[in-house]
């Protein structure tokens, strides 16, 4: 069974998803960071495929994308790095997050095949339109056992949330507030109202909140009405500031600090 | 001109031009793009909108722009050349046609703030101008490198009351300014309208901008008929960065197969030098700024940095309609080097007393290449004037003395 499905069957609250960019800070850091996050207790991990023009991302993740590209990271290289991770004891569910163009250039069917072969469980492609997904991608995703994760924002209409929920089969990614990743979202009354409004819709998929979640307080506030939350930019900043030799320990401390 | 049969060159109900176009936007932008998509035709077909648009084009922008028979240039090239004088528009280029149209749309959507991207600064100035006219807040993203090399336009935008924000990500040029403008729109989804300056971006932008620019070919038809007795020229020439002046100059001729459409791309230092912006020569199908189109990219699908002497053609993609015109062979795309563009700019200046923009000079440089005969009628869209490029031209003055 898909590892995402299993996860959400067993865990329905305080799920922690951590994002990091593949090939950052060093090209070969991808798999060691994956190991460290699993050992630290992250429930699922989202690996970013770097892109030259990440429009949905704020400065922190943009820079990590650029550095990863400068390091030589590509979609093909990432799949090479992920070869055999499942044989090496990585059991945590893995999502690949990225923009559509590099995936299209790699070849969509080949991409799905490689995801299945390396043990990737799901994909987040923010600029993949819903109707294109339905028309061209859904059959391939199903064939290769891949879950597609859709984003929902405070501006998304209830009707569209239901439509997305109907198509999704992993979880729904709730964008906490209008903005790009890493924006300072204070978990204010507006965000709380949006999250409880979404909860009231009674979606069939689990929900994880992202954008602006950076510490224990924002994680707790975000998880009140949802299945859990996603931390990205704050984790990238940690990687940026941590010397290579202290990376594993710093990751452990960071993850432990989110759910004290 | 309305069409009775569907044209393969015009946008279909789903927002595509053949395989190109669409709206590849993250969910954060979906409500904005949807709002525009569901309302733009209703708004721009409204008689009151049409009246106001037409009046502003006339009284504010200075339309119709003349169609000028360039006799000395015609003699030099050996054909009959008419220049569609978009350089005489207020703010110095065709860009104002689009910004007037879009600010009227923004008002009708109840938006309070305008965000825009700019490369050379022409679209930024045209946007700042209409924002001043309508009293709307204006934020223009411009690549940090472009801010340095196009300083007069930065000052013009500031004088008009716009806030110019440097885009410091990526290559710090037009592509990155576009990314930053999109990010701003993501962060301010309800009160802001994004005025894209070219026929790029998610549907409905390419179609909306082409419609606003179509005034160029609409006027050309009337003026050519008056001056020559025929509505259709043999050739229409225009430069293509994103391609808005070309989209307007081609618009009413798309379904007239007797009119050859020529698009000039910037070859930079040469198509094979690695310093070029010749998108159709170097690119392949991909997705950029919300549309499926042809773009310059690495094998891994990362967008490549383009290069051109002209900041307005320094863009790694082209509008989806142009991608379709290229793919179907309806338009011919020629690659023009920096040098050929400079030659053409000095030639026009000295033969006709018109200093063209560097972008426009790329279209002029096609004239000797198209095989036009003496009696053929060639229309060149003279998209902008060269004041903004004087610093560049001055560096080359001695070579042409």
Image (spheres, rainbow, N blue to C red):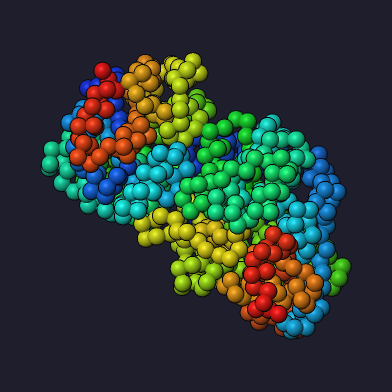
Identify the image quadrant of the N terminus of chain A. top left
- The residue at the point 45 percent across, 21 percent down is A186
Q: Nearer the viewer, residue A84 or B140?
A: B140
Q: Position of residue A62 (x, y in %)?
A: 42, 43
Q: Position of residue B296 (x, y in %)?
A: 47, 61
Q: Is residue B134 left or right of residue A3?
A: right
Q: Is residue B136 above or below residue B358?
A: above
- The residue at the point 47 percent across, 35 percent down is A180
Q: Is residue B307 above or below residue A166?
A: below
Q: Position of residue B134 (x, y in %)?
A: 76, 37
Q: Is residue B77 left or right of residue B362?
A: right
| Image-quadrant location for residue B286 | bottom left
Q: Is residue B270 left or right of residue A126?
A: right
Q: Is residue A63 left or right of residue A39?
A: right
Q: Nearer the viewer, residue B327 or B81?
A: B81
- The residue at the point 58 percent across, 66 percent down is B309
């Amino acid at each position: 069974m898909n590892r995402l499905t299993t996860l959400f069957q067993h865990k329905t609250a305080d799920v922690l998803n951590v994002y990091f960019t593949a090939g950052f800070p060093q090209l070969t850091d991808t798999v060691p960071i994956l190991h460290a996050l699993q050992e630290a207790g992250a429930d699922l991990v989202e690996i970013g495929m770097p892109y030259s023009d990440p429009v949905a991302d704020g400065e922190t993740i943009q820079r990590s994308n650029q550095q990863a590209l400068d390091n030589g990271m590509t979609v093909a290289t990432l799949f090479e790095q992920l070869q055999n991770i499942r044989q090496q004891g990585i059991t945590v569910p893995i999502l690949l997050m990225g923009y559509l163009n590099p995936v299209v250039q790699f070849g969509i069917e080949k991409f799905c095949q490689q995801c299945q072969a390396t043990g990737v469980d799901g994909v987040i492609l923010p600029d993949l339109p819903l109707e294109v997904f339905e028309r061209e991608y859904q059959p391939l995703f199903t064939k290769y056992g891949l879950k597609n994760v859709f984003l929902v924002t405070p501006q998304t209409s209830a009707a569209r949330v239901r439509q997305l929920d109907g198509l999704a089969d992993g979880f729904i990614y709730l964008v906490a507030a209008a903005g790009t990743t890493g924006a300072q979202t204070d978990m204010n009354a507006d965000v709380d109202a949006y999250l409880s409004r979404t909860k009231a819709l009674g979606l069939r998929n689990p929900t994880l909140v992202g954008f602006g979640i950076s510490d224990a307080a924002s994680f707790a506030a975000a998880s009140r009405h949802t299945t859990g939350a996603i931390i990205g930019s704050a984790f990238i900043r940690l990687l940026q500031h941590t010397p290579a030799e202290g990376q594993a320990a710093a990751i452990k401390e960071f993850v432990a600090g989110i759910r004290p | 001109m309305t069409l009775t049969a569907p044209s393969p060159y015009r946008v279909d109900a789903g927002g595509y031009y053949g395989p190109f176009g669409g709206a590849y936007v993250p969910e954060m932008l979906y409500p904005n793009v949807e709002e525009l998509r569901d309302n733009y035709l209703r708004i721009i077909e409204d008689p009151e909108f049409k009246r106001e648009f037409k009046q502003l084009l006339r009284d504010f922008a200075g339309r119709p722009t003349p169609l000028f028979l360039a006799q000395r240039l015609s003699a030099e090239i050996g054909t009959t050349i008419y220049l569609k004088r978009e350089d005489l528009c207020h703010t110095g280029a065709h860009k104002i046609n689009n910004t007037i149209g879009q600010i009227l749309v923004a008002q009708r959507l109840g938006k309070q703030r305008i965000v825009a991207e700019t490369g050379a600064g022409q679209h930024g100035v045209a946007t700042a101008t209409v924002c001043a006219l309508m009293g709307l807040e204006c934020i223009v993203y411009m690549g940090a490198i472009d801010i340095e090399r196009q300083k007069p336009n930065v000052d013009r935008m500031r004088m008009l009351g716009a806030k110019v924000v440097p885009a410091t990500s990526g290559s710090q040029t037009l592509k990155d300014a576009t990314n930053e403008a999109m990010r701003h729109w993501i962060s301010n989804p309800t009160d802001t309208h994004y005025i894209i300056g070219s026929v790029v971006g998610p549907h409905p932008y390419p179609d909306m901008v082409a419609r606003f620019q179509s005034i160029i070919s609409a006027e050309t038809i009337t003026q050519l008929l008056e001056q020559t007795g025929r509505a259709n020229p043999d050739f229409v020439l225009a430069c293509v960065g994103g391609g808005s002046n070309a989209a307007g100059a081609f618009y009413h001729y798309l379904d007239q197969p007797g009119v050859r459409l020529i698009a000039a791309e910037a070859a930079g230092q040469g198509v094979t030098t690695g310093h070029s912006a010749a998108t159709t020569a170097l690119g392949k199908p991909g997705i950029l700024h919300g549309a499926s189109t042809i773009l310059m990219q690495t094998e891994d699908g990362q967008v490549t940095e383009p290069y051109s002497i002209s900041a307005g053609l320094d863009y790694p993609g082209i509008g989806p309609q142009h991608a379709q015109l290229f793919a179907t062979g309806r338009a011919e795309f020629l690659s023009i080097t920096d040098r050929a563009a400079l030659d053409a700019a000095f030639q026009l200046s000295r033969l006709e007393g018109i200093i063209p923009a560097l972008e426009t000079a790329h279209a002029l440089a096609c004239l000797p290449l198209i095989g036009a005969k003496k009696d053929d009628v060639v229309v060149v869209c003279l998209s902008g004037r060269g004041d903004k490029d004087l610093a560049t031209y001055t560096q080359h003055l001695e070579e042409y003395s």
